[in-house]
Amino acid sequence: MERIKERKPNATLSGSYRYAWQQMWKYFLYLLLVAIIVGVAESPTSILKNTEAVDASAGVVVLQLFAAAYMLLFLPVVKYGSDLLELCAIRNEKLDVVRIFDGFKKNYLNIILANLLTFALIGIGFVFLIVPGIIIACRLVFVSFLVMDKNMDPIAAVEKSWEMTKGHGWRIFGMALFAIPVFIAGLLFFIVGAVISVMLISLAFAALYHAIDLETNDALVENSSAPPEIS
């Protein structure tokens, strides 16, 4: 993949959001198109929500089954693809919006299984108490990036995300909390502001992933280049 210039965002809340803000305007039209595609892809999920209160007639049940299949087998691929493109923007890599659908041609099974595994683990955490669910959600926030960026299988991606987020749990939780006022501020500017706020929040997590990934790679290089200890 063509890389224009490598930059290193800081693995902090302010550093991630600041870098995301910079990159969002640099690739605004590309990222806006990605956001629109994701929004269109998410719109059919309202079918399931809108029919929950309706009598369970045969037609409604079939419609709900189709909607559930759509959310399990189609939507995750688009969302994982959007995460990959946002990561490309953070890395200053060449953007090709068509790549949002790459998951249907390759890595499809890993995307579906990783999404199911992540959802199940977070769900189990919330069942036992809310706090474990929040912790698991924070520690697995990088699963989609690892599946798309490193071509990892679901279990490897979960394990690697848990490893990468060690020591960053509170920072990730803080970024999630900070996303609330960011989105509220976006709503003040109606639909356009809301879309921009969602773009910024997604890019901020991509920036954090990239920063931690670079730190991990730098540490590996330093360890490999260090002279062996003399016993």
Image: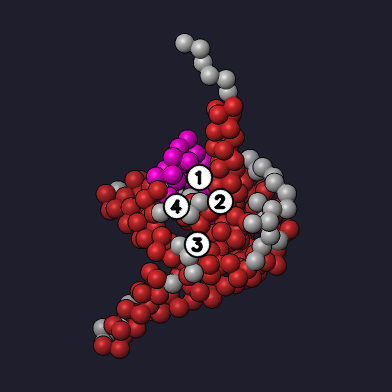
Q: Secondary structure at mark 4?
A: loop
Q: In the drawing, does residue 8 fall left or right of residue 118?
A: right
| Residue 135 to residue 85: above or below | above
The residue sitting at 59% across, 41% down in the picture is 214
Q: Residue at x 53, y 19 (%)?
A: 228
Q: Secondary structure at mark 2?
A: helix
Could you tell me how many numbered marks the image carries? 4
Q: Which label number is shown at residue 80?
A: 3
Mark before the other along the chain sequence, 1 or 3: 3
Question: Gap in Å between the C-alphas at discs 4 and 2?
Answer: 19 Å
* Residue appearing at x 40%, y 48% in the figure: 156
Compared to 177, does 45 lie above or below?
below
Q: Earlier in the sequence, mark 3 or mark 2?
A: 3
Nearest-to-viewer mark from 1 and 2: 2
Q: Is residue 135 left or right of residue 37?
A: left
Q: Are marks 1 and 2 in contact (CB under 8 Å)?
A: yes
Q: Which residues are magenta?
A: 157-181
N-terminal label among 4 and 1: 4
First reached walking from the N terminus: tag 4 or tag 2: 4
Query: Which dot, 4 or 1, sits closer to the camera?
Result: 4
Residue at image x 45%, y 46%?
Answer: 161
Relative to 217, say whether 178 is above or below. below
Q: Which mark is residue 231?
A: none
Colouring method of the image: secondary structure
Give the label on residue 152, or none: 4
Identify the residue position indicated by label 1 in the image: 172
What secondary structure is the stretch in magenta mostly built from? helix
Residue closest to the eye, 135 or 76: 76
162 in magenta: yes
Residue 143 x/y as whole percent: 45, 52
Q: Earlier in the sequence, mark 1 or mark 2?
A: 1
